Amino acid sequence: MKANDCIFFQLAKISQLGARTWGQKVSDLNITAVQAMVLRFLYDKDGVTSMNLGKKTELDSSTVTGILDRLESACLITRKNNPNDRRSILIYLTEKGKVTGGEVAKRMEEANKDFFKTVNKQEEKELRRIINAIRNQYAQ
């Protein structure tokens, strides 16, 4: 097998392409690709703990904390005490965060369409099925 035929090489290259494409799509919002993903999850449902957000985004706690620090510095989120658990805080979008989150959601739809424009809907569906099957195999 040639090195560039290796599935791990191919996956690394498609991952780089996806990250670059997504990063370019949100760069003018002055946020990184990962910050945009976190904002997108919060746009779906804020008022969550950082632990819950970490589970949803599949990021470790130190990464989530750093991202939240930067989003808070940019006035996109706010942290509030959890009235049900004094040991945790809840993360909420600010008004600016809600606007940016809505824009991220819109751009995510567009980016997904653009990324798959060279394949038909059935091929896209099959690729997503395969990716999920492989991820599920290793999640256990």
Image (spheres, grey):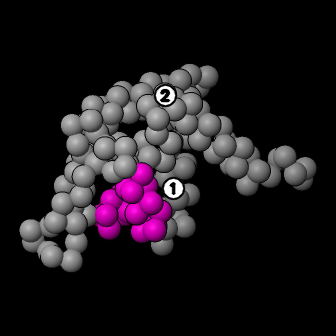
Q: Is residue 57 magenta?
A: yes
In the image, is 44 to the left or to the right of 55? left
Q: Is residue 127 magenta?
A: no
In the image, is 95 to the left or to the right of 113? left
Quadrant for residue 21, please give it.
top right
Does the image show residue 138? yes
Specify the farthest residue to the front. 73
Q: Nearer the viewer, residue 126 or 95?
A: 95
Residue at x-position 48% and y-position 72%: 140
- SS of the residue under disc 1: helix
Q: Mark 2 = which residue? A: 28
Q: Mark 1 = which residue? A: 133
Please determine whether, in this image, residue 67 is positioned above or below residue 93.
below
Q: Nearer the viewer, residue 121 or 60?
A: 60
- Tell me which numbered mark, 2 or 1, is placed earlier along the sequence: 2
Please, what is the dominant secondary structure of the magenta stretch? helix
- SS of the residue under disc 2: helix
Residue stretch in magenta: 50-70
Task: Report the amino acid beneath label 2.
Answer: Asp
Image location of residue 95, percent across then percent down: 21, 37
Image location of residue 99, percent across then percent down: 27, 31
Nearer the viewer's eye, disc 2 or disc 1?
Answer: 2
Distance from Cα at disc 2 to Cα at disc 1: 34 Å
Task: Report the amino acid beneath label 1.
Answer: Ala
In the image, is 48 to the left or to the right of 12? left
Image location of residue 135, percent across then percent down: 52, 59
Specify the farthest residue to the left. 83
Residue at x-position 33% and y-position 59%: 53
Residue at x-position 90% and y-position 50%: 2
Q: Residues within 10 Å of mark 2 (few under 14, many from 20)?
A: few
